[in-house]
Amino acid sequence: MERLRSKLTYANVISTLVLFLVVAGGSAFAAGKLGKNTVGTKQIKNNAITAVKIKDGAVTSSKIALSGLGTVPSATNATHADSATRATSADTATSATNAGNAQTVGGKTAAQIAADSKVTCPVGMKAQAGLCFETSARATASLASAIFACVKEGFWMPTLGQLLAYEGQNYATNPPSEWTEPITWDGTTDEWAYIGSANTTGLGSSFTPTKSSTSHPYRCVSAPTN
């Protein structure tokens, strides 16, 4: 200890203190006053920069390797939404097809079905009271001749009620009295049938039992078809 003291002088102490201040001050200066562009990848430790040290908005898409990113949740949902849109479109198309099929029965449209459901009558006949009536009365004939003429063409004669219903809708005045069915027999010598006529008012309607041997106008009837 005595030897150390004997070596210490005022100059030694001052020079040592100055050296210490220079070294310590230089290090502090270097730590707090780094020059521009003096820090590189070598000066930064791995994992040294944390998220809080990155300025908001500093990292842009040009600095991100997009190929390294996975699908973010919203993008996944967007993909699913696109699939759902396609599924909805396909479902809509299927529904439209089914709706179109629902408009047909047996391959026919509603208009075609309606047209087919309309009753039609043979030429020269008109639909009335559930039957097809000839629009014009035929020339006078006996009851037997009138019946056979209608049957020969696949027709028959109307009853008295059917004839009056037709004439009541198609005549303004009384038409000529016409043969009707059924036929009755008096049990002795002759058959009888009613001849009838009517007008639109229902007034003046008449029907009279008449011998089959007399001659009267008549008209045939047929069932409507579709």
Image: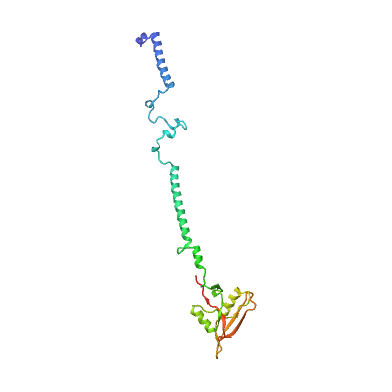
Across and down, in percent, residue 123 comes to: 51, 72
How many dots with numbers?
A: 0
Residue 117 visible in the shown view? yes
Across and down, in percent, residue 133 comes to: 55, 75
- Residue 163 or 35: which is nearer the viewer? 163
Across and down, in percent, residue 50 comes to: 42, 31
Across and down, in percent, residue 36 comes to: 42, 22
Would you say 35 lies left or right of 132 here?
left
Above or below, 109 against 181 in this view is: above
Quarter-wise, where is residue 193 in the image?
Answer: bottom right
Would you say 139 lies left or right of 20 here?
right
Quarter-wise, where is residue 137 in the image?
Answer: bottom right
- For the N terminus, which image quadrant? top left
Please tell me which residue is depicted at 46% across the width and 57% down the height of the picture. Answer: 97
Above or below, 156 against 29 in this view is: below
- Residue 175 or 198: which is nearer the viewer? 175
Please tell me which residue is depicted at 47% across the width and 60% down the height of the picture. Answer: 102
What is the residue that sits farthest to the front in this orientation?
Answer: 139
Above or below, 48 against 18 in this view is: below
What is the residue that sits farthest to the bottom in this orientation?
Answer: 188
Residue 179 visible in the shown view? no
The way the protein has been coloured in the rendering is rainbow
Please tell me which residue is depicted at 58% across the width and 85% down the height of the picture. Answer: 210
